[in-house]
Amino acid sequence: MPRRALRICGHCGKTHLSGEQCALVAARDKARKQRADARRPPARQRGYDGEWEKARADYLLAYPSCRRCGAKATLVDHIIPIRTAPGRRLDRTNFQSLCDHCHNAWKQAQDRKGTP
């Protein structure tokens, strides 16, 4: 099967294989993520404690499939985020099982838009 042509990077000016990330972009993204993580409170302070771990495990046993695509669920997501409704942190009616892909693509896009 033929390979796709090399592309010229708009960041460093070098050529890269299609789908290959530029080292400059990778370093910039890593630094940006480190800055964001430094400002973010630890998981325990955000409400993800022992009670949450137990509730999450129980929910995944009851609902092992992704709510969006039907794949094996690996995450339990809050439909209405904890920061919006802290009182619903352990409310099972506010949970949904998601696979990594659906959580990282669809759900986080929804969060950025501000829609639950």
Image (spheres, rainbow, N blue to C red):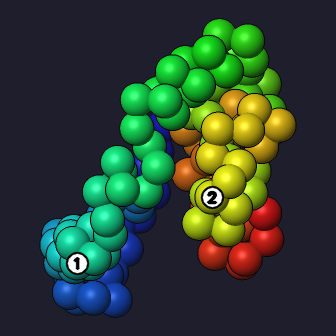
- The foreground one among 58 and 110 is 58
Is residue 68 shown left or right of residue 74? right
- The foreground one among 47 and 9 is 47
Which element carries disc 2, helix, strand or loop? helix
User: What residue sits 63% from the left and 58% below the top?
Assistant: 86
Crowding around mark 2 (Cα neighbors within 10 Å: few <14, some 14 to 19, many 20+) is few
Q: Amino acid at mark 2?
A: Pro
Q: Quadrant of residue 83?
A: bottom right
Residue with the mark numbered 2: 86
* Residue 75: assigned label: none
Which element carries disc 1, helix, strand or loop? helix
Disc 2 or 1, which lies upstream in sequence?
1
**Which of the two marks, 2 or 1, is nearer to us in this view?**
2
Residue 90: give x, y in percent of width and height.
64, 38
User: What residue sits 69% from the left and 16% below the top?
Assistant: 64
Give me the C-alpha separation between circle 2 and circle 1.
25 Å
Residue at the limit of the structure toward the top, as seen here: 61
Residue with the mark numbered 1: 35
Instruction: Decide: is 57 above or below 56.
Output: above
Q: Quadrant of residue 108?
A: bottom right
Residue 40: give x, y in percent of width and height.
32, 69
